[in-house]
Amino acid sequence: MLETGKQDLLRALPAVDAVLREPAVRTLAERYGRAALTAAVRDALDEARRSILTGEEPSVTGASVLETASRLLSGRGLRRVVNATGVILHTNLGRSVLSERAVAAVTEAATRYSNLEYHTVSGERGSRYDHAVPLLRELTGAEDALVVNNCAGATLLALSAVVADAGSVPEDAKSEVIVSRGQLIEIGGGFRIPEVLELSGARLREVGTTNRTRLADYEKAIGGNTRAILWVHPSNFEVRGFTESASVADLTSLGLPVIADVGSGALLPLGDEPRVEGAVRDGASLVLFSGDKLLGGPQAGIAVGEGCWISAMRRHPLARALRADKLCLAALEATLGAYLEGTAREELPTLEMFHVPVEELRERADLLAGDLARIAVGFEVDVTPSVARSGGGTLPVHELPSLAVRLGGDNVEVLAARLRAAEVPVVGRVGEGRLWLDVRTLLPGDEEAVVEAVKEAAAGAAGSAGG
């Protein structure tokens, strides 16, 4: 038997129809649609029932249920978000923003038929793996190239293909891949190099120590079952001090295939990030990198290198499971075209953010602060120096001078939550008792969305105070 208090609260829960007669329903229905709103109200009522049964005493009015439904709806579906965090390649917010040229190419590929796997000259079947290859050859100097769905997939496919094509080993043995202990990294989402090696069918052979691995360590580890050497750029961390490591050029002197995972896909100089063409020039058999990090394009895993190993990757059964779709290929070709034409820094939003002068950022910050000061009654508004970062596992210690508009009030955590709940969510960072909105990562049109979100938050704060 339920306790009397719980029974009373459960009986007090409003019906779905009663909640949908609340005054705020019209606005929410226009934003999310009637069907989605109704489903969210049911979920909100279920959430309230669970809370009551666990001993809590939630508000059971129609308005409170509708507020919960609104919160649930705001977290559903892929939608635009304003990135005011100062992290350019924010993994949780989608990393690179595509250029206008890439968006046009995606639209064309999505709304029309294409020659994805068709030779228009011969009239015969073609291969999706041929797209973007000439551009990648030209930009990197590699013999051949292959595009798959992401860099983790490219790493798995490369290791699997090299192990499978490197020759037979005794039945009681297992192919080995050598890697430095200092490069056994884990990056976002629990992607761990040792686990990828295991999936590829290779045995991991660790050499050196976390901070020092010499060429001689690799050389001593080579045996009859060794199939390749894996060199991994640490990406999201940096070891300083008493360190030593072997370069890709050093490793190629050992006579084994060298697979170099350079991570971010930098095709232009940026900080101390390794460049793709440098690894190719140093003699790596395969060079692997991402399309949606410093390259500034769509999510993709790209492999460039020697023709025999790229062919082995194409032939491997995993290639089909990891293949890129037509939208990715269209966006990637358009992105690479900007590099070939020498317009990448100005055309690609990711690279442009890295290079915006601080003086320009100050002008934008002052304008935004002025607009917010006029509408954010009850909030303190100022402009202050900030530090932006690359993000996405790239340039981990690289700092970019920036400017931020700060908002202060009685409870900045509540303010931050209200901005995230706006029609166009605004994501900043909280620190020093203020909400920081870094302007380096604001895209064209984002200032207007920030003003609207703050206006909503100010109205909500005034309503709470009046209640």
Image (cartoon, rainbow, N blue to C red):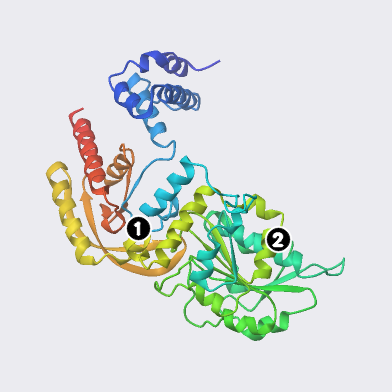
Q: Give the percent coordinates (x, y) of residue 214.
A: 61, 84
Q: Give the percent coordinates (x, y) of residue 336.
A: 45, 62
Check whether the beta carbons of the residues at disc 1 and disc 2 lie within 8 A of each other: no
* Mark 1, residue position: 349
Q: Is residue 87 visible?
A: no
Quadrant of residue 20 in the image?
Answer: top left
On the picture, is 369 further left or further right than 75? left
Residue flagged by tag 1: what amino acid is it?
Pro
**Identity of the residue drawn at 31% across and 56% down:** 441
- SS at mark 1 in the image: helix
Quadrant of residue 165 in the image?
Answer: bottom right
Residue flagged by tag 2: what amino acid is it?
Ser
Residue 269 numbered tag: none
- In the image, residue 362 sits, relative to residue 100, either above or below, namely below
- Give whichever of 305, 402 is nearer the camera: 305
**Identity of the residue drawn at 41% across and 37% down:** 75
How far apart marks 1 and 2 lie (CA) works out to: 36 Å
* Mark 2, residue position: 200
- SS at mark 2 in the image: loop
On the picture, is 50 further left or further right than 199? left
Q: Quadrant of the C terminus?
A: top left
- Give whichever of 70, 330 is nearer the camera: 330
**Identity of the residue drawn at 52% across and 42% down:** 113
